[in-house]
Image (cartoon, rainbow, N blue to C red):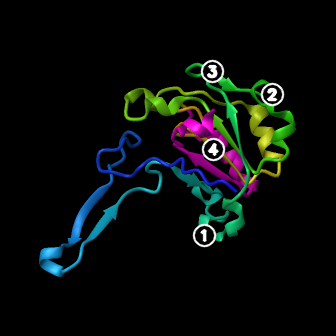
Amino acid sequence: MKVIDLTQAISPEMPVYPGTETPDFVDANTYDRDGFKETKISFYTHTGTHVDPPVHLFPNRTALDEFPISQFIGKALVIDCTMLQEGEYITKEQLLPYANQVEQADFLLFHLGWDKYWGSSKYFEEYPCIDEEVLSFIMNSSLKGIGFDTIGLDPVSDLNLTRHRALFAKKDILNIENLKKFAFMWQ
């Protein structure tokens, strides 16, 4: 199995959701003072590339550490959605070219090309996201997870997180956000 890292690097200068504090790196121990180096790192769980579990929105649902390790490993299928513009929806039409492969996938990774805006204010604007029909398909599938190169599953204007709530209310699934581009992977 080929493993590909699609995570954004954590740094004090990285972009974070507006209103969230940036990561804080503090020298806890130094070579001169302590004989070794150790850094204290503080950041929010939704910093950079991260995984949302059902407990993110529902207190009695599954947390990341409660999933079996097998939930995090599997075959990923990249769905090319780069033709979509700001605020458009990922529909079943984008899944059709992959019809035979979708059933064998453990993870659907939606490549919107939005990672090119990482570090700019546009990254936090109305990116494309899944519509109700695709959400319903995901909810009725045996997928282990879904992933996006955007900040979320819901439109940025949906403060109620409607799609997150529908997905996590009853389904044990991982939602991966802020994936980064890996040229070989997306081709």
Magenta span includes 176: yes
SS at mark 2 in the image: helix
Residue ID at (49%, 34%): 115
Residue type beneath disc 4: Gly
Tell me if mark 3 has few (under 14), some (14-19) or many (20+) residues whose alpha carbon lies within 10 angstroms of its own: some
Residue farthest along the bottom direction in this orientation: 35
Q: On the rendered structure, is 69 left or right of 14?
A: right
- Which one is closest to the eye, mark 1 or mark 3? 3
State the residue position of label 3: 84
The span from disc 4 to disc 2 (Cα, nearest Å) is 18 Å
Q: Which residues are magenta?
A: 158-187
State the residue position of label 4: 147
Q: Position of residue 97 (x, y in %)?
A: 80, 27
Q: Is residue 164 above or below residue 93?
A: below
The span from disc 1 to disc 2 (Cα, nearest Å) is 35 Å
Q: Earlier in the sequence, mark 3 or mark 2?
A: 3
SS at mark 4 in the image: strand
Residue type beneath disc 2: Pro
Q: Position of residue 129 (x, y in %)?
A: 63, 31
Q: Earlier in the sequence, mark 4 or mark 3?
A: 3
Say whether marks 4 and 3 touch (CB < 8 Å): no
Q: Earlier in the sequence, mark 1 or mark 3?
A: 1
Q: Which mark is residue 65?
A: 1
